[in-house]
């Protein structure tokens, strides 16, 4: 049942933090010095999300209704202190002459206000509970083909206006330029944790002068995980070449 999943709905994904030595061209904003831990909405709930649902999940992360060594403890107390909104926050449609699916012609992302009437109130709720709140870009449900600079700019401006602490950039749509997202966030003087969720297709690489190019805090090494041993093992094996790589 949904109620049962809400109690045990921690999402574990196979990711790696950008680790580096020496001279680099890598994102260094002081975030993700240790692996981020928490919960995201997609694996269990898909598009069945709303502002009220997300705020209830935040309450669940911080509710001290479990005993650990005889002490009432929350999941946030144990380090699971991030609540991430995944896909399905956007209003799918057809906007402007270019017929973007969730960006207006000026690049502004369109929020489904029926489900999410006040994004800032949602992130404020999480911050009052001392947890971070994550957003999601390059959405898959209403995949967009906008590649203009204005779409990147408006995504970042909305991210900051809504008060999100992190952004997960998926492998859907056309907005796959992680460097552009990273530069725009830095240009605005913000510190936002950036997750490269390109399904293992976009990995750190070396520039011509030997520097490590990694404009994100951490990255995904594999495809979606499924509820099977084979899926877990296949995803785990994607780490082998990365573990052997010289950094």
Image (tube, rainbow, N blue to C red):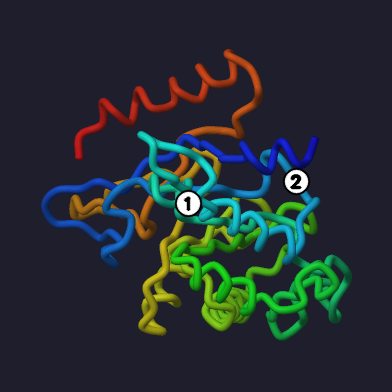
Question: Which label's residue is closer to the chain start, 2 or 1?
Answer: 2
Number of marks in picture: 2
Q: What crowding class fits label 1: few (fewer than 14 Cα within 10 Å), some (14-19), or many (20 or more)? A: many
Q: Residue at x 32, y 61 (%)?
A: 31
Q: Nearer the viewer, residue 59 or 88?
A: 59
In the picture, which quadrant includes the C terminus?
top left
Q: Badge 2 is on which residue? A: 46
Is 164 on the left-hand or right-hand side of 51? left
Give the percent coordinates (x, y) of residue 233: 50, 17
In the picture, which quadrant includes the N terminus?
top right
**In contact (CB < 8 Å): disc 2 and disc 1:** no
Is 220 on the left-hand or right-hand side of 141? left
Residue 123, quarter of picture:
bottom right
Give the percent coordinates (x, y) of residue 50: 76, 62
Q: Badge 1 is on which residue? A: 196
Q: Measure the C-alpha gap from mark 2 to mark 1.
A: 19 Å
Give the percent coordinates (x, y) of residue 177: 51, 62
Considering only vertical position in the picture, is 158 above or below 22?
below
Q: Nearer the viewer, residue 138 or 17?
A: 17
Q: What crowding class fits label 2: few (fewer than 14 Cα within 10 Å), some (14-19), or many (20 or more)? A: few
Taking the view exactly as shown, the residue that stands out farthest to the left is: 22
Give the percent coordinates (x, y) of residue 235: 50, 25
Q: Residue at x 28, y 28 (%)?
A: 243
Taking the view exactly as shown, the residue that stands out farthest to the front is: 70
The numbered dot on residue 88 is none
Taking the view exactly as shown, the residue that stands out farthest to the top is: 230
């Amino acid at each position: 049942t949904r109620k049962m999943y809400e109690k045990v709905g921690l999402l574990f994904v196979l990711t790696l933090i950008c680790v580096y030595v020496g001279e680099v061209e890598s994102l260094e904003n002081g975030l993700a010095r240790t692996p981020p831990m928490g919960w995201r909405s997609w694996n269990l709930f898909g598009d069945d999300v709303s502002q009220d649902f997300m705020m209830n999940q935040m309450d669940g992360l911080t509710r001290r209704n479990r005993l650990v060594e005889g002490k009432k403890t929350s999941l946030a107390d144990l380090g699971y202190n991030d609540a991430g909104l995944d896909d399905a926050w956007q209003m799918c449609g057809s906007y402007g002459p270019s017929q973007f699916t969730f960006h207006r012609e000026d690049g502004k992302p369109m929020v489904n206000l029926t489900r999410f009437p006040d994004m800032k109130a949602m992130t404020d709720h999480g911050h009052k509970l001392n947890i971070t709140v994550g957003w999601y870009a390059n959405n898959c449900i209403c995949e967009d083909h906008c590649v203009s600079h204005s779409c990147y700019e408006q995504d970042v401006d909305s991210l900051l206006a809504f008060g999100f602490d992190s952004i997960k950039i998926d492998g859907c749509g056309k907005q796959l330029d992680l460097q552009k997202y990273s530069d725009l966030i830095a240009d605005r003087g913000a510190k936002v944790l950036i997750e490269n969720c390109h399904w293992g297709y976009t990995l750190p690489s070396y520039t011509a002068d030997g520097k490590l190019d990694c404009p994100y805090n951490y990255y995904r090494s594999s495809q979606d995980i499924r509820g099977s041993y084979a899926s877990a093992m296949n995803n785990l094996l994607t780490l082998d070449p990365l573990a052997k790589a010289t950094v």
